[in-house]
Amino acid sequence: MSQETNTVTIRIMDRDFKIKCPQSKIMELKESAGLLENKIREAYRQCNEKVIGIEKLTIVAALNISHELITLQKNNGLSSINKRIHKIKNKIEETLASQS
């Protein structure tokens, strides 16, 4: 069973892009485009609004998004490890308590 795909037009930095997207993912695509637009504009402000190419701004924005993703993944990984450590600690404490 294949999902129906639509061609969706998204606008980023006053440019239109036609993207094929499954119907069920259109809202996510639009949210992603909005996030990218915001990150590009943020990169532009960080460059003190100097005139630089859209390609460079897009790369800077993509790097910022990638950095945020990696940071979140690492934090989730640490959270998972901390949960495991807590479970192991509880088991050790239960075992020690039952032996007393």
Image (cartoon, rainbow, N blue to C red):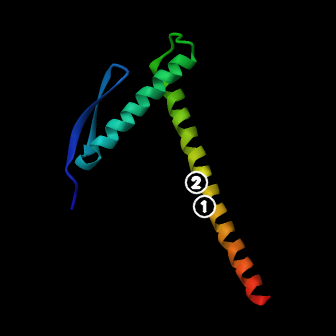
Residue shown at 50% from the left, 23% from the top: 42
In this rendering, position of residue 12 left or right of residue 63: left
- Dot 1: within a 10 Å radius of its alpha carbon, few (fewer than 14), some, or many (20 or more) residues? few
In this rendering, position of residue 34 left or right of residue 70: left
User: What type is the residue that disc 1 sits on?
Assistant: Ser
The quarter of the rendered structure image containing the N terminus is bottom left
Q: Which quadrant of the figure has residue 15?
A: top left
Label 1: state its secondary structure: helix
Q: Which quadrant of the figure has residue 47?
A: top right
Whether residue 56 is visible, yes or no, is no
Residue shown at 54% from the left, 39% from the top: 66
Q: How many marks?
A: 2
- Dot 2: within a 10 Å radius of its alpha carbon, few (fewer than 14), some, or many (20 or more) residues? few
Residue shown at 75% from the left, 83% from the top: 97
Q: List the single residue furthest toward the right.
A: 100
Picture coordinates of residue 86 (x, y %)? 67, 67
Picture coordinates of residue 71 (x, y %)? 60, 44
In this rendering, position of residue 95 left or right of residue 36: right
Viewer-closest of 58 and 33:
33
Tags 2 and 1 in contact by the CB under 8 Å rule?
yes
> In the rendering, which numbered label is found on residue 80?
1
Q: Which quadrant of the figure has residue 26?
A: top left
Whether residue 99 is visible, yes or no, is yes
In this rendering, position of residue 9 left or right of residue 43: left
* Residue highlighted by disc 2: 76
Viewer-closest of 90 and 73:
90
User: What type is the residue that disc 2 sits on?
Assistant: Asn
Picture coordinates of residue 51 (x, y %)? 50, 10
Vertical arrangement, residue 24 with respect to residue 84, above or below: above
**Gap in angstroms between the C-alphas marked 2 and 1:** 6 Å
> In the rendering, which numbered label is found on residue 31?
none
Residue shown at 80% from the left, 88% from the top: 100
